[in-house]
Image: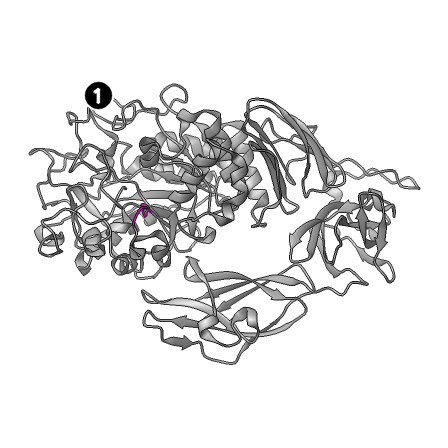
Amino acid sequence: MHSARPHPRGRAGRLLLAATLVAAGGTVAVAAATTAPAPARAAVALNDSEVTANLWEWNWTSVAAACTDHLGPAGYGAVQVAPPQESVKLPASADGAYPWYEVYQPVSYKLDSRFGNRQQFAAMVTACHNAGVRVYVDAVVNHMAGTNNPAGTRGYAGTEFSGYSYPAVPYGDGDFHRPGDNCPTGGAISDWNNEAQVTSCELLSLSDLYTEKEAVRNKIAGYLNDLIGLGVDGFRVDAVKHIRKDDFAAVLGKLNNTVVEGRRPYVAQEIFDGASNPALQARAYIGNGDVLDFAYAKGIRSAFQGSISALANVPNWNLDAPGANVFAMVTNHDLERDGVVLSYKNGTDYVLANYFALAYPHGKPSVYDSFTWSNRNQSPPHDGTGRVTDTVCGAAWNCLSRTTGVKGMVGWANAARPVKTVSDFTTVNSNVIGFHRGDRAWIGINDSGSATTATFVTGLADGRYCDVISGVATGSGCTGSTVTVSGGRATVTLPANDAVAIHVNARPGASPSPSASPTASPTVSPGDRIATTFTVAANVAAGQDVHVVGSIPELGSWTPANGVKLAAQGGGAYRATVSLPRSTAVEYKFVKLTAAGAVTWESGANRTFTTPAGGTYAVTETFRGDTVSTTVATTFSATATTVYGQNVFVVGNIPALGGWNPAAAVALSPAAYPVWRATVDLPANTAVEYKYVKKNPDGTVIWESGANRTLTTPAGGTRAVTDTWR
């Protein structure tokens, strides 16, 4: 919802609210607003993915079909759906019949809306879970319907209301902020940088809930817990900027765990940008959950309507929040109508921008689909009573989320997810770029009107890969184009206004055999192979790459030029995953190789291992003969409950952890509350002592009890520790 400043929407007192997803904390159960049926249970495991499809204002039947037929099979982690509560019904508004913003004006918390009834909503949640897809609800909890609605206006379930009276909840006059009662103005917000006005006065004449009151908090939590009881997994919470942070934290503390996964509901908060007051900027809200990043969406638009080479500088952009705390988007329903971001009206720029957002490691990416529009306030397609009709992709509805390219990029994002950095960002020209995510995935994007051929460093092991933009991988080949990686590089023709993307999980059938072994080797079927990950810490000179070479054809049969190139992971670590035959004795070494063919072998005897009969295998080593000074990306995960305003830090005996000085401790992110998490580069081969501390808003520090915790970092690669506050 626009809130940093008044916006020319042309309707003082008519709601245009965007919603916000919320990562909640706390454990106190609250009675549901409506009696819930038996909790929804997933028939299958939910997809291990951070990608969300935002199917804005689709009805419940259409969302269920999308989950079953497209989102689940494509690997989406979640679907975001429109506000499900009963809203006002406006058949003859000044903005036309049944304008889209109706649904952001609640009349009650009954699950009877223009998208369907309670039974249809519950069936949709079950269908999505059965397809492996979580359900995030657009939750409107800052306010109720506008006080300026015409007399006699009712909700979609026929509920009556008036002014500050909503008997179906029930809310009465004392449940709302009024002029002189916390709101320091005559009722409206006049200073968009005044926190008291923004949180306690009326936004667009909407009845602003008195969230300081426990009874109001309980009713809001009851509504959200009712949804959780039906299987909802998270929330995009609308207009969170207009709720005091401590009030919202108190509501979150009353929410139940999700019924399918038994974890805290996901939370992403809508904090419109534009405020100069830091207390009203997105970073101030991350203690309560993730936030939508408006600056990122606007920056993407600027690049794709200018020069996409600017995308190399994303780490230097002034973004709304760190990537770990972001629900990322290219557009949403408010922003596309304001023209400040890309939308379906921008054609291939919009499509390519979505490919980029799925590929770039900033936040949890989302793909937006809704109805086409020519008037900013027009209704979605509906029947004679305002109920939204089934989605039919085409002229009236956009369905980018189910296109081959976007589905392929969802798989790409899932494959690349373990690697949170971009490597070898290549600018061929101002509108042709390429980059890879470690040894997991590579993409090239051409935002120009002519095809371009260039050679890129892919980070991938040598072999053939299917382009997931133009097709899919099958047991016999690729339905689209094929990319061949050799020496870690690929020469690729990027079509005009299009992209090519490859990843480790999209290869044509079984991986082809490497160069022939001196002695004949038996044919090995894909089921007889073991994904084996090689990680080595090494110092390399300019122009050198690190390879693994060994005694079997898959490792080059001791020929360095035929070995497997390892991708740089940062901090002097290199990694590649190779498919090797099972139950096989392997000898190998690491080598450094230049483009001219100069080889530097590591010292010492051949290394050896035997692949297991099943599963996967991994080795982590240091290049022998090097004096390696490197760091190890170490992830600290601590389960700790906090009160509002508290944050959790890790502090330890080495400079990277503050040298036991709490003022220099490393802050942990609460995005997965009650798990707090941060990744820190620590020196390799080092014994580390550490503890967790909580910092209060007044600066006082609480140390956890017990002895110092300890860990020893490996020679390279990564390290992770999982702890519980003592």
Q: Which residue is mark 1?
A: 384
Q: Residue at x 28, y 47 (%)?
A: 36
Q: Is residue 627 above or below residue 506?
A: below
Q: Nearer the viewer, residue 246 or 444?
A: 444
Q: Residue furthest bottom?
A: 707
Q: Which of the 4 image quadrants contains residue 469?
A: top right
Q: Residues within 10 Å of mark 1 (few under 14, many from 20)?
A: few
Give the color scheme: rainbow, by chain, secondary structure or one colour: one colour
Q: Residue furthest right?
A: 519
Magenta stretch: includes residue 274: yes
Regarding residue 45, the answer to whether it shows in the image is no
Is the magenta region chiefly helix, strand or loop? Answer: loop
Q: Residue furthest top?
A: 395
Q: Residue furthest left?
A: 151
In-image side of 277 versus 617 (left or right):
left
Q: Residue at x 57, y 49 (%)?
A: 421
Question: Under tag 1, what secondary structure?
Answer: loop
In-image side of 456 versus 563 (left or right):
left
Q: Residue at x 81, y 48 (%)?
A: 593
Q: Is residue 634 above or below residue 187?
A: below
The range drawn in magenta is 270-275
Magenta stretch: includes residue 83: no
Regarding residue 136, the answer to whether it shows in the image is yes
Q: Quadrant of the N terminus?
A: top left
Q: Nearer the viewer, residue 55 or 685?
A: 685
Amino acid type for the residue under numbered disc 1: Gly
Position in image of residue 50 (x %, y %): 48, 45
Position in image of residue 542 (x %, y %): 74, 51
Position in image of residue 40 (x %, y %): 38, 45
Q: Quadrant of the C terminus?
A: bottom left
